[in-house]
Image: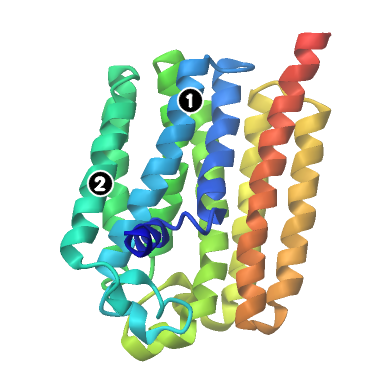
Amino acid sequence: MRVRLSAYAQLMRLDKPVGTLLLLWPTLAALWIAAEGVPPLPILLAFVAGTFVMRSAGCVINDIADRNFDGRVARTHDRPLPEGRVSLVEAFALFGGLLVLALAIVMTLNTATQLLAAAGVVISVAYPFLKRWTHWPQVALGAAFSWGIPMAFTATTGSVPGIAWVLFAASAFWIIAYDTEYAMVDRRFDLDIGLKSSAILFANSDRAIIGALQCLALVLFFVGGLQAGFHHAFFAALAAAAGLFVYHQWLIREREESACFKAFRNNVWVGFALFAGAVIEYGARALS
């Protein structure tokens, strides 16, 4: 039983929290902005729990979709499905259970947020299958991982104002950039087995396009900060994010796989900087 539970945990990536944090930080930043300070505790807890559950569900459906490919890729060959430590039926049951849990969480929120959540599930489920037909699965991930931003506003205010879509677009550009870094890790394997990604599409222009996407994200986050009435802290956080993007460019300069993976993982600190900047801004307002 202990071995089986360990396999389930690996299937949900409980041993690899980077993806959860990448999803969590921009969502929390949006909650703080939507609430103009600390959001109501029930909403905050619902979003934290929902982030954890939906990231786990996304990992399970991703492994289900890729079960015939993961065993042929160095980074993923030891996942539970290709190794046979979890059956396909068990994986679907786990995915269904996580969706039921996510439904229970979202039912504590208002109707507008519930409708957005339903759309978010569709995007999340579609993402792992898109790499068979398009070089742009990273766009779907950008939408899926940014979907918590408009949901944060509907849960808090009942509507989705313009600033929410500015932040959504900023987050999506950032995510496409870092997921391309991630795809660079598997590029040679994906080419061999016929899967598609933005890293394959961009080819030798990958670094330049990642840089352009990062710049677009910074510009839009800057616009969102202005719309929120932010001052020094948030823009200092953006400067820190810009510095981290420069670091990423240095890491991926030779397109070495482990360095590209390190650049991808480092994006956790980009998200944390943005969240911290928003928190400090509202904290300063409360003290003034």
Residue most extreme to the bottom: 192
Residue at the spot 37% in from the left edge and 59% down from the top edge: 2
Where is residue 104? Give x, y as percent.
Answer: 28, 28
Tell me which amino acid carries mark 2: Val
Among numbered discs 1 and 2, the one appearing first in the sequence: 1
Decide if residue 85 is on the left or right side of residue 285: left
- Quadrant assignment, res 139: bottom left
Q: CA distance from mark 1 to mark 2?
A: 23 Å
Tell me if label 1 and label 2 are in contact, CB under 8 Å: no
Mark number for residue 173?
none
Q: Is residue 283 above or below residue 73?
A: above
Q: How many marks?
A: 2
Where is residue 161? Give x, y as percent.
Answer: 47, 22
Residue at the spot 61% in from the left edge and 49% down from the top edge: 217
Q: How is the image coloured?
A: rainbow
Few, some or many C-alpha atoms within 10 Å of disc 1 (few <14, some 14-19, many ≥20)? few
- Provide the secondary structure element on which disc 1 rests: helix
Near-viewer residue (157 or 52) = 52
Tell me which amino acid carries mark 1: Leu
Residue at the spot 25% in from the left edge and 79% down from the top edge: 68
Where is residue 156? Give x, y as percent.
Answer: 46, 17
Mark number for residue 45?
1
Q: Which residue is mark 2?
A: 122
